[in-house]
Amino acid sequence: MVKYQIILLAAFLIVQGFEYWLKSVNFRHMKKYGMSVPQGFEGYIDEQTLKKTYEYAVETNSLSVKESLFSSVLLLIFLFGGLLNLYNTWVNSLGLPFILNGIIFFLLLSYLATLLSLPFSLYGTFRIENKYGFNTMTLRLWIIDFLKSTAISTILLVVALAAGFWLIRESPGYWWVFIWGFFFMFSLFMMYISPYVIEPLFNKFTPLEGHELEDRIRDLMGRAGIKVSRVFKIDASRRSRHTNAYFSGIGKVKRIVLYDTLLALMDENEIVAVLAHEAGHWKKKHVLKMIAATETIALAVAYISFRLLKIDFLSGIFNIHGASFFARIVVLGFIFSIVSFPATPVFSYFSRRHENEADRFAADLTSTPEWLATALMKLSRDNLSNLHPHPLYAKIYYSHPPVVERVGRLRSRPD
């Protein structure tokens, strides 16, 4: 089995090395071209902003690489250094029932991963985000949010694990399809209840009633064939100056949520254009298409996992003595993390196509492409977004087309 360890290690290092190389290529490209104000961005972006963008990218990328290297080294030690074997032996020694055994096995690993990521999270929030004027969160609020999110994730993880392992125990020959169905329904359930139960635990939602903007939004959504139940403003500025807006809800009736930072940054025309873009995603059925694609892949992965978890090959790779079902899942997850990398540019490609379609829809719905163009330029400026990504890096990782391309396409359309 040593040769399989070598093959897996080599494959992991190749993927990781390629990712780090791409980041360095993207960074050098930004260093070379990042001080150039794109045509048409004059008045929105200046050289001082681009210099600040470059410095922000240096610090965030450096932290990202350090965290990635730290996590990768620990993962390799855990798998190839025999710690998984020791951990599996210890959990098995507790003599717990199958379902409780699985919950403890993965819950403790989840807590450990969260604990190890804390220094990077704190540094990113209170050092980098503070330095560049994004963070508005106090340490007290950060701790409260952390405790809330930990409690919520624990509850959800325990429920998901308990249900999943119960299905495995009760239907050993067909659990793969039942688990796929359960997690599909569970994700839809979370999409439905999250806006009403979870999100209000972190933010205050204030109805945007009696406001001219609300009337314009309802009129716009009506022309797009979307019913709006409520339009809310949330106090995002308590935590960050980053901006956003989103739809929530299943079916034709949507809740629209606007960050207060977005309301402060943009005029009404630009906000309407941003929401028209989001409406485009719903009207073009992008969410439905992505769900269909991911669930099809998830079903295939579930079946492949079912077949592989039945054999001793997975535990044999790392010489795990008395390997539990759960240790095999860890090994399988590691393998999938390697072989799934080629899917990254594929999903990125279709995501960029969807964004372009939503941009075109917004331009047609508002009849004024310039509204969305200026909104995108403001978002790029205020979020210190890289305006000059390397083309290869963008093709592999960017879920949205580079903003310079988006603005150029919008402005090439007639008003």
Image: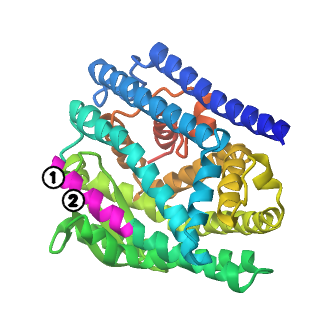
* Image side of residue 348 versus residue 283, left or right: right
* Image mark for residue 144: 2
Q: Residue at x 28, y 61 (%)?
A: 147
- Locate residue 16, reporting x and y percent: 63, 32
Q: Residue at x 65, y 55 (%)?
A: 330
Q: Residue at x 37, y 22 (%)?
A: 54
Residue behind mark 1: 140
Magenta span: chief secondary structure: helix
Above or below, 285 relative to 366: below
Q: Is residue 382 visible?
A: no
- Is 145 a magenta residue? yes
Q: Which residues are magenta?
A: 138-152
* Image side of residue 113 versus residue 46, left or right: right
Which part of the image, by quadrant, shows the N terminus? top right
Q: Residue at x 81, y 61 (%)?
A: 308
- Locate residue 40, reporting x and y percent: 39, 29
Q: Are marks 2 and 1 in contact (CB under 8 Å)?
A: yes
Residue furthest top as drawn: 32
